[in-house]
Image: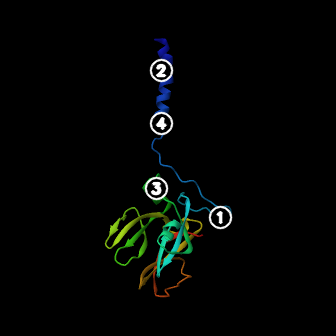
Amino acid sequence: MKPLVYLFPFLLAIVTITSCQKKDVEPQPKPFVEKGQKAVSNPYPGPLIPVYRFVKNGRHFFTTTLNEGYAAGMTLEGQAFRIRQHDPNLFTHMYENWKTETLHRYYNTQDGSHLLKVHNNTELSTQWAPWVYEGLTGIVYSYPGDEPNGVEIHRYRKSNPVDYLFTVGTGELGSGAAGYVHEGLAFWAIAN
């Protein structure tokens, strides 16, 4: 009986320590401050990926893989901007901690145009006629201060042929030019 008396406090300590440990704790973002910059809210920790801009017959196409554009017979105009790669291992509601939104691509079955569209977690939609959902492209920012190298991405629309063009800032087309109408600020991405 005496050996059990000596063992009891030891077992009690193990049970107490084990029950006090946090379980299923969500990963927290690491602080992000570049040398010489002011501290900003933590950007989403996913790696940066390029978004390439292709064109064919007056229609633009944006993709994160060069092969997709070349396979469609399109001409590469260059790297448009960068976005963060989606990490499926992070909890969905954690995106809100970084003030990010998911960027999705759609294809219009009637006119052949492609569209990048930002969704927040509450309005995620996979299809609306005549648009067909092509998939998640990556992660972009909702506000300018959430990424130290953030740039405005503006959306322009042309009617003939129907085309959606995304540019860094308004320097390329201003308030509209070459048949394009400025539709406004679409999202924030990362400078090249």
Nearer-N-terminus badge (1/2): 2
Q: Mark 3 and mark 4: span between their CA atoms?
A: 24 Å
Nearer-N-terminus badge (4/1): 4
The crowding category of the residue bearing disc 3, from other C-alpha atoms within 10 Å (few below 14, some 14 to 19, many at least 20), is some
Q: Mark 4 and mark 2: span between their CA atoms?
A: 18 Å
Nearer-N-terminus badge (3/4): 4
In the picture of the structure, the residue carrying the numbered disc 4 is 20
In the picture of the structure, the residue carrying the numbered disc 1 is 37
Residue 10 image offset from top left, x and y in percent: 51, 23
Tag 3: residue type?
Answer: Met
Tag 2: residue type?
Answer: Phe
Q: Is residue 69 left or right of residue 108?
A: right
Mark closer to the observer (3, 2): 3
Nearer-N-terminus badge (1/3): 1
Q: Mark 1 and mark 2: span between their CA atoms?
A: 55 Å
Q: Is residue 62 visible?
A: yes
Dots 3, 4 in contact, CB < 8 A? no
Q: Nearer the viewer, residue 128 or 191?
A: 128
In the picture of the structure, the residue carrying the numbered disc 3 is 94
Nearer-N-terminus badge (3/2): 2
